Image (cartoon, grey):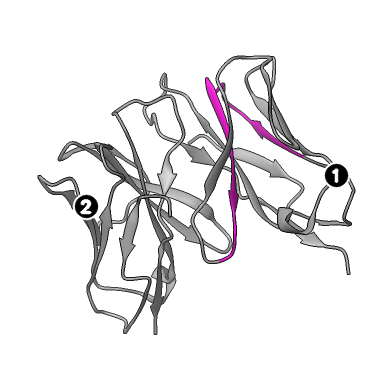
Amino acid sequence: DSGVTQTPKHLITATGQRVTLRCSPRSGDLSVYWYQQSLDQGLQFLIQYYNGEERAKGNILERFSAQQFPDLHSELNLSSLELGDSALYFCASSGGDRDNYGYTFGSGTRLTVV
Amino acid sequence: GQQLNQSPQSMFIQEGEDVSMNCTSSSIFNTWLWYKQDPGEGPVLLIALYKAGELTSNGRLTAQFGITRKDSFLNISASIPSDVGIYFCAGRNYGGSQGNLIFGKGTKLSVKP
């Protein structure tokens, strides 16, 4: 157990729908990162939050949004889902904002859009 | 944007063999990390490198931060079946607009049939 908790583990939904993925960071970690992993693209950075504020944005689609709450858990919202959004979505956390250390990853949410 | 080229994409190992993989970048990084991902799990940090030329070991794993700061390699000695999985390199450069980890596409290690 890495200490980073992601729910749900699996999600199957139809095109056009909206889903919310949830992440609880490791105890004491203030930064949360979201990554998308698809077969041909590897791990793609989506967005980072630090202590409730957006800190950095990667290749995140406009249909996707995220937030980090006062208790530091984070949610990734995916809307108007398309078949190509099917992927593994990972949340990771780290202690600070610009840590020079690695991130701790959760076990991921596998999203299947049908 | 910054890209990491990781090779080989896949390789087969026989128990006892040494394994080598590497990662190159078009940009300079000031941190290199190596992760391993098992099926159904998230990546787990294996080794972190912070200085050009640094050579770091973690058990049978050895990784080096290239002198040019644009490459890194990971060696696994005397491989065992549980070494199977996907290995990712990751780099970070806070000088860029994106100070977050950039990942390679992974090297998949499988057991030789």
Q: In the image, which disc is placed on residue B78?
A: 1
B79 vs A84, nearest the viewer:
B79
Magenta stretch contains residue A101: no
Quadrant in which the C terminus of chain A appears:
bottom left
Identify the magenta region.
Answer: B21-39
Disc 2: which chain?
A: A
Quadrant location of the N terminus of chain A in the rendered image: bottom left
Image position of B72 with respect to B8: above or below = above
Image position of A105 (left or right of A73): right
Q: Residue at x 31, y 32 (%)?
A: A95
Residue B26, position in %: x, y? Answer: 61, 28
Mark 1 or 2: the one toward you: 1
The secondary structure type at the circle numbered 2 is: strand
For badge 1, the amino acid type reads Ala
- Above or below, A62 against A99 in this view is below
Whether residues under marks 1 and 2 lie with C-beta atoms below 8 angstroms apart, the answer is: no
Q: Does residue A105 appear left or right of residue B62 in this picture?
A: left
Is B34 inside the magenta-drawn segment?
A: yes
Q: Residue at x 25, y 56 (%)?
A: A62
Type of the residue with mark 2: Ser
Q: Which residue is mark 2?
A: A74
| Numbered mark located on residue A66 in the image | none
Helix, strand or loop at disc 1? loop
Q: Position of residue B22 (x, y in %)?
A: 73, 37
What whole-number distance in Å separates the C-alpha atoms at marks 1 and 2?
Answer: 41 Å
Q: Position of residue B101 (x, y in %)?
A: 46, 36
Up-down: is A101 above or below B18?
above
**In this view, B2 is above or below B39:** above
Main secondary-structure element of the magenta-colored stretch: strand
